[in-house]
Image (cartoon, grey):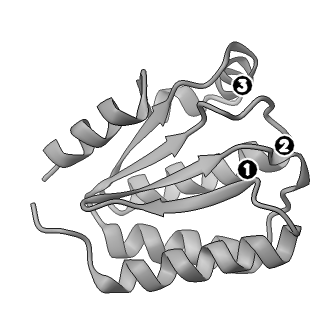
Amino acid sequence: MSPISDVVDGLVQDFNLHLEHATGKRGMRVMRYARCIAYVFEDVGGLHFDERQDSLIKRLAKELGARCTILDLATCNTATSTALGFWADIITQSRLNGGRVLMVNPNEFVLRSIRMVGLDRLCEPVADIERALAQANDVD
């Protein structure tokens, strides 16, 4: 599989800048890897969802197409309604564009919240980021 396009680089940078200005901190960031992207969630308490973020999620999902998207929840300690909305939007947009979503190691509290809203049925659990990246490289 070929590396993702330069357009994704610009979208990832735009997304991270927007998040930093919108929240004043980095509770979430987007990481670009050779063949996938990862949304990394840490301190979700200060996040808010806006039209710009929704637009960027849709554009990234469309640009990635049938590639893999990773939700890295390994360091996320809570699941607010806003965070669940982010995750639902990312999963939905990725799947609508033929992509696959891997969810990395959420803690028990976060996983319980994910299960309550049914998001666990739309993504694949993975133990750690290294395994997720290995699986992302297997996606055609």
Pick whichever of labels 2 and 3 is earlier in the sequence: 2
- The residue nearer to you, when weighing 99 against 3, is 3
| Residue 62, x across and y down, in percent | 39, 73
Circle 2 packing at 10 Å, graded few (<14), some (14-19), many (20+), is some
Secondary structure beneath disc 1? helix
**Quarter assignment of residue 33:** bottom left
Q: Name the amino acid, label 3.
A: Val
- Report the Cα–Cα distance between label 1 and label 2: 6 Å
Secondary structure beneath disc 2? helix
Q: Name the amino acid, label 1.
A: Gly
| Residue 45, x across and y down, in percent | 89, 46
- Mark nearest the camera among 2 and 3 is 3
Pick whichever of labels 1 and 3 is earlier in the sequence: 1
Q: Which mark is residue 81?
A: 2
Residue at 84 percent of width and 74 percent of height: 22
Label pair 2/3, CB-CB below 8 angstroms: no
Residue at 63 percent of width and 72 percent of height: 16
Label pair 1/2, CB-CB below 8 angstroms: yes
| Residue 125, x across and y down, in percent | 43, 25
**What residue is disc 3 on?**
110
**What residue is disc 1 on?**
85
Q: Name the amino acid, label 2.
A: Ser
- Report the Cα–Cα distance between label 1 and label 3: 13 Å
